[in-house]
Image (tube, coloured by chain):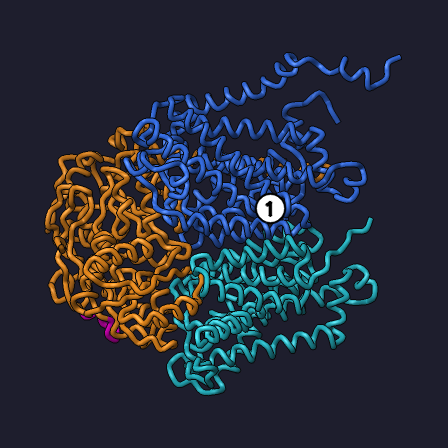
Amino acid sequence: MKTLAQRVPELTPGLLPTLGRSIWPFLAGFGFAYLMQVGIAPAVGEFYGSLLVNIGIAIVLAVSLNIVNGFAGQFSIGHAGFMLVGGNAAAAIVYYGSIKLWGSPEIHGGFLGPGELLLVAGCVAGGLWAAFAGLIVGLPSLRLRGDYLAIVTLGFGEIMRVLVTQTGPQLRGKDAAEASWFTLMTKLNGNLGFSNPQGAYLDPQNPFWVWVFVSILLIVAYRLKSSTHGRALLAVRENEVAAEAMGVPTTRAKVSAFVLAAFFAGIGGALFAHELGSTLKPDPSTLGFQKSFDIVIMVVIGGMGSITGAVLAAVILTVMPELFREFDQYRMIVYALALIFMMILRPQGLMGLRELWDTSWWRRIFRRGGAS
Amino acid sequence: MSRLVDVFLHALTQGSLYALIALGYTLVYGILRFINFAHSDVVMVGAWVSYTLAGVFGWAATGSPAIAMPVVLILTMGICAVLGFTIERLAYRPLRRAPRLNVLITAIGVSLFLEHAGRLDAVFGPDPVSMPKLLSEEPLFHIAGVAVPIVDATVVFLAIALLLLLEWLVYRTKLGAAMRAVSFDERTASLMGINVDRVVSITFLIGSALAAAGGMFYGLKYGQLDVTAGSVWVLLGLKAFVAAVVGGIGNIRGAVAGAFLIAFVENFMATYASPAFQDAYVFAILIIVLLVKPGGLFGSVTREKV
Amino acid sequence: MNLCAWRTSKLVMTMALALVATTACNSKRNSSGGGGSDPTPGSGTGAGPAATGPILIGHFASMSGAEATFGQSTDNGVRLAMEERNAAIDAGKLKGRKIEVKTLDDQGKTQEAGTAVNRLINEDHVVAILGEVASGLSLAGGAVAQHYSVPMISPSSTNPQVTQVGDMIFRVCFLDEFQGKVMAKFAKDELKATKVAILFDQSQPYSQGLADFFEKPFTEAGGTIVTRQAYNSSNPDVSAQLSSVKEAAPDLVVLPGYYTQAANIARQARKLDITVPFLGGDGWDSSKLEEIGGDAVQGSYYSNHYSPEEQSPVVQEFVKKYQAKYNQLPDGLAALGYDAANLLFQAIDKSPSLSGKDLAATIAASKDFVGVTGAITIDPNRDASKSAVVVQVDHGKRTPIKRYPADLK
């Protein structure tokens, strides 16, 4: 009779089968992104294409914040701060990198061209840089409870914003090519906000990378939710003291959730930076606390902890302002009232804790094996 | 020397304004444990209501009588108290048992509503205006060669009077005892026969009245009101909120101390270091204080019991 | 629990239905309105605009949000120009097609500005875009207009970066660099100032830029900047900065910010016994300046695009019409909106076709266009080369003191 410990290695599947099983969702995600690029985007046209890009970025931001706010129950309202950090890093890498590599910041290569590879590198670097910022903020402040954490994240976001406003104007052409990277990183165009005047990689007809990152995030979030780490987070959310008593390393769980969310917020910022017609203007509504609130609203309206809820809310809250655009000054009043009524009439958000496939109508339609 | 005195006096006036506003945050947090993000908008409404009232009474022009300022102040405080009461009744009370994040989102909704409804032509209008001079800007007296205008002196004096009144109310009256009891433990308090709903309503009345006073004094001191959706109000509220947290949120004396600390650091750093980072200093103090003393300067960290 | 689930399902279904319905509505509107297929990027909107009926022009502006007055003033000017033209066509005085302006709100947010311009171009199939006031928003909207090769004229963004976006982006106002030069020259020659203090708004790129552009020519001409202080428009307390200014004892204070802050600073400065004159830029231009600043701003100077007091017939006629329609004095933004719209209308009439390329080429060739804000010539950088006027604030009036030509050295 073998002990359990001895049987574990036998029962653990080998590397290849594991890899094979983990890779297919990612392949499906890439396939979906490719479909968006070659099928959906040309079909819906330029305006709805740009709306789709906006939706994709909103999904990245809402689902990533959901990891901290929804899964771990930690209240962060500095998400736009991480967006700002990641977005500026990515924008600077792509813009100045293009100048250093090719002599001009024009769009290099079409779909999957060398410029787009630089874009992906920039996005990942922006994400890592934001994750690092998340670690710096998260380590000490996650010892604080609830609302205090919220306030510190808010403060962090605002300090980042003030620092970016103090940076020098964006360099062009020869100046940029000759400057060192250290100097370039302090030339983020101050108050005007960084933008590439030569075009945008993520225009409405080229949304591929947006959907790649959306897919990756959704898979990561879904897997996280049902994994040991995710359950630890949910336990922290429900009752931190009880979770600690059960042996959950609460601080580590919280910090890792925070860093993961910051990473994807940085990627969201990086995608935002390369969207057609957006600039990284460090003002409260673009990348300050008002933006952070917008993302929190998405998470709460979708239902704290529900991934599909966050996606749904991101879609609705991106489309809705567009429908009301012609109301001019009444637009925000309608939005504010809708928000209040929503919270009073449906405090658990659209989906509550559940996912789309937990709802009864989904089951009725898809009749999933008579479960429950 | 005169510069030092000058900065000191400014910090004192600004600190009193922050304190008036911070108390609203701290009172509500102490009792309901949620951050009332619509509070800064009550400040804004207070300022605009006082502007409108001065116009209605015909005191907007020069030469307003001495009676103008107290009348406008009391009416403004009354109107805003009713506003705060209504907000709590309609928007927050239905969510008393809901998660706190919901109440927070509702507060953001209320805040957006007040800001954008306020800028309609039928309400306050879309333009910044100048506040009528209900108080003279003549110097009352001089300290080390620095003139102290009547406005500043009155603002500081009235703010301190209101703070003392609140202190008396909370620590010396039966109502105050009820408020403290609800803040300590809502359920036990209601078991002891305290009408929690009433206490919460009164808290909002008081907090909003103080905010209205803060808003009006703000208008008098700077002579100018930003548009209702302007970032001036949000930032003012945010700084007052930071003051409440630095002092230990839920603690009345802490909020006042925090307000003066913020005002002094902000003003002295802006004068003697660089004014470019004026807002960053405030948030830097916040983070430093919270890291050193997680409950704020005067707050206590409550241990969670199982 | 079951009940709850049932409610969710109903809610979600309703939302989905609503979404489908609105999308359906939108696409229906497209097919009837534009009749065009989706234009591919770079090829312009040739398929979009109809060949008869009114020509559609897009205007994106901050109609809500904190900067709403800017958008509304500009929109008033644009609409006055449109109505004038359409009335002239109705009366048979003018040949050509009527114009219709569609205004979309961007709330003063950059992302919204981009989306609004995209919607104007691809949903409404406008032939050209007007907007924005704030340079940051013009940059965002300009990137989209450039991408789809639709010409865009900014009425009042003075930051140099705006027209650097591409060959489709124009402006009808002068640049901050020119304005800074004008202010420096005025300070040096007319006010005989040698020691100057600058207070600029660090949260506004406009203010920061103008401060730099003033400083350079002024110090080159032998003046000294005794102190340079930053403030933040969201923080009205500038006592710390003013006490530094007082210590430096300048003989002129330059306030390159917007009128609300400038008026506020002027008031606080007078309280602190700073008695020297103030000099500002076109951000001062508002009837609210005196309302907020009171006596403190009387006698101050600022450089501007035009003065309603100027006696030229173009200005007087515009002021009269504007007052008749809106019952208020037009500010500089309204005048620039009016000029931008008229310059665009003229180009539409002259252009061989309404394609973005032709239209942009015609706008670029505009020369000596007589506008309310002076003669406008579009230079090779697509900026307007035009004159500026320095006015003095005098109890509700703006007395023109000196006009500086476009080729100021």
Q: Quadrant of the C terminus of chain C?
A: bottom left
Tell me which chain appears blue. Answer: A
The part of the chain drawn in magenta is C393-399
Q: Please say if C354 is above or below A6.
A: below
Residue C221: x %, y % from top left:
19, 60
Write down the quadrant of residue A5 in the picture: top right
Report the front residue among C224 and C371: C224
Asked if residue C261 lies in the magenta stretch, the reply is: no
| Above or below: residue B296 compared with residue A218 | below
- Residue A230 image offset from top left, x and y in percent: 68, 33
In front: A132, or A353?
Answer: A132
Q: Which residue is mark 1?
A: A76
C396 part of magenta stretch: yes
Question: What residue sits 43% from the left and 47% below the top?
Answer: A164
Q: Quadrant of residue A14?
A: top right
Question: Can I make out residue A260 in this image?
Answer: yes
